Amino acid sequence: MQALPACKETQAAMALDADTRDQLINTVRRFVAERLRPIEARVAEDDAIPEDVLAEMRALGLYGLSIPEAYGGLGLTMEDECLVAIELGRASPAFRSAFGTNVGIGSQGLVMFGADEQKAKWLPAIASGEIVTSFALTESEAGSDSAAVQTRAVLDGDAYVLNGAKRYITNANKAGLFTVMARTNPDIKGAGGVSAFLVPSRLPGLSVGKPEKKMGQQGAHICDVNFDNVRVPVENRLGAEGEGFKVAMQVLDRGRLHISAVCVGVAERLLADCVAYAAERKQFGQAIAGFQLIQGMIADSKTEAMAARALTLETARKRDAGHTVTLEAAAAKYYASEMVGRVADRAVQIFGGAGYVADHGIERLYRDVRIFRIYEGTSQIQQVVIARETMKRGG
Ligand code: COS
């Protein structure tokens, strides 16, 4: 399959023209249908994506969707990235996770806040997929309360010495580079005492735990990351001291939008599976698609998927136009992740017994989508963000 077409602009991302966008979407759609869908069950069973498929993802340019073209990526706008993420959502979400950190939370701190030398050093290898990146914010006592990070970074000559532990870090077992949030000022208890660092995984003292056993998304991995006197060169600090929390929040604003798009893609795929099954499955002498109670479930899922798609893409366009979308991205993530949970639940119901057994993959997706309501901010955190921002705006 041919590599994906790049955005023509080198600095700020510029929307693709209609033909190039169609070509991009069609290439991803074919890759999903021909290469990913057929091996979903095997990936879940093996808890691993085959190396040749990862190589194809790299060759297609999927690791570099969001990296500026000047650094070897495709430099997509947020809207185009969301359209691609919707297509990718039509295959098991574990596939997207393989390059999802390079596209989102693992690279965007560097893209948004990195110095030119930092970008030049790391972004080309991130865009090509030569290295995998991870975002190390969460700790055992800092989940939703992410300003409470306890990992310490103490300046010692030309390096910061990192000590602490991060938890549930996506792709940590494959990562070559971590964006780590650590406390540089212990006198400031909250957000202001946190700084961000680019930490290569090869540094002495950094170790990664075993992948956790999870409810779903087998083939995607999360692990603990431990820092035991890891000396991180001063030039690896991302942004100024004390800016780390804001780096993390802005990375997450963007990441939440990408996750919303993936939720839309999974919901659309589940709908297509439901419609096909309902047309073929006969009960009481006719296809169950003819029953209005089944139609009611299809109608609810379709309406909600359409609403989530519209909110996600409208927010992406707003971000591309330079607006802050903290509220809108939280609303999109909240709505889309809850929506796909309901759609997956109805899909199990429409498939009936066949939805509960593994053969049709519906129960697998039902489990896979559960995490969307938790990571990159729980639904309850999204509610907090939405309410705060709404009150700031006076309604
Ligand atoms: N963009 C830019 N700056 C932001 C921001 C955003 N989206 N959100 C907060 N900030 C800034 C605030 O403006 C504030 O700056 P000042 O001190 O200069 O005023 C600072 O960051 C602290 O913000 P706030 O007081 O809102 O922090 P809280 O501790 O109350 O935390 C929540 C805010 C709960 C919203 C935040 O901790 C959060 O999003 N938690 C969930 C984290 C998450 O998604 N974890 C998933 C793990 S990563 S997969």
Image (tube, rainbow, N blue to C red):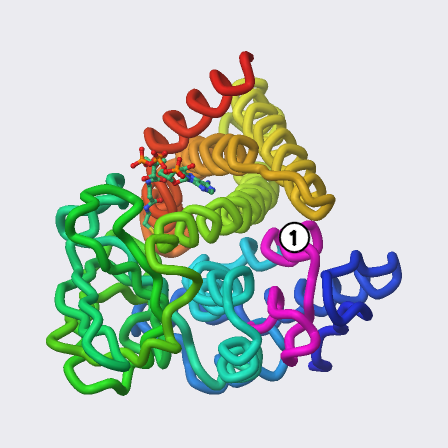
Q: For the image shown, how many numbered marks are present on the structure?
A: 1
**Residue 120 location, quadrant:** bottom right
Q: Position of residue 25 (x, y in %)?
A: 73, 61
Apparent side of residue 51 relative to residue 59 in the rendered image (left or right): left
Q: Is residue 66 magenta?
A: yes
Within the displayed image, which quadrant is ligand 1 positioned in?
top left
The answer to whether residue 340 is left or right of residue 379 is right
Position in image of residue 367 (x %, y %): 33, 47
Q: Is residue 197 left or right of residue 317?
A: left
Q: Residues within 10 Å of mark 1 (few under 14, many from 20)?
A: many
**Residue linked to disc 1:** 78
Relative to 6, is 260 above or below?
Answer: above
The correct choice, above or below, for 333 with respect to 9 in the image is above
Q: Going 48% across and 35% down the picture, which residue do you hit? A: 330
Q: Nearer the viewer, residue 187 or 200?
A: 187
Name the element at disc 1: helix
Instruction: Look at the picture and state if 30 lies above or below 326.
Output: below
Percent coordinates x, y for residue 1 in the rendering: 69, 81
Please name the amino acid that badge 1 sits on.
Met
Q: Which residues are magenta?
A: 63-86
